[in-house]
Image (cartoon, rainbow, N blue to C red):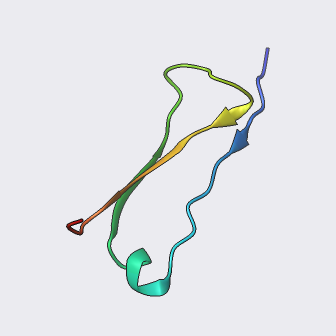
């Protein structure tokens, strides 16, 4: 059986997008019909 879901998105300015280092779709646990998108950014808060 195939399961389809909606992938969430990250929106970023061009300057922030340059700081993105890695992205992955979280599939370990199903919360809803969304698949969380995890993005690692290289910046300090």
Q: How many marks?
A: 0
Depicted 1 relative to depicted 12: above or below: above
Depicted 9 relative to depicted 5: above or below: below
For the point 45% across and 45% down, the residue is 24
Q: Quadrant of residue 2?
A: top right
Q: Is residue 9 left or right of residue 6?
A: left
Q: Quadrant of the C terminus?
A: bottom left
Image coords of residue 37 (percent x, y): 53, 46
Depicted 4 relative to depicted 45: above or below: above
Q: Which residue is farthest left?
A: 44
For the point 23% across and 69% down, the residue is 43
Q: Is residue 41 left or right of residue 9?
A: left
Image coords of residue 17 (percent x, y): 43, 76
Q: Quadrant of the N terminus?
A: top right
Q: Which residue is farthest bottom?
A: 15
Q: Quadrant of residue 11?
A: bottom right
Image coords of residue 30 (percent x, y): 61, 20
Q: Is residue 4 left or right of residue 36?
A: right
For the point 61% across and 56% down, the residue is 9
Image coords of residue 15 (percent x, y): 40, 85
Q: Is residue 18 left or right of residue 24?
A: left
Q: Which residue is farthest top?
A: 1
Depicted 14 relative to depicted 37: above or below: below
């Amino acid at each position: 059986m195939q399961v389809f879901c909606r992938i969430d998105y990250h929106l970023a300015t061009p300057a922030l997008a340059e700081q993105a280092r890695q992205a992955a779709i979280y599939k370990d646990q199903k919360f809803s019909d969304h698949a969380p998108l995890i993005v690692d950014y290289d910046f300090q808060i």
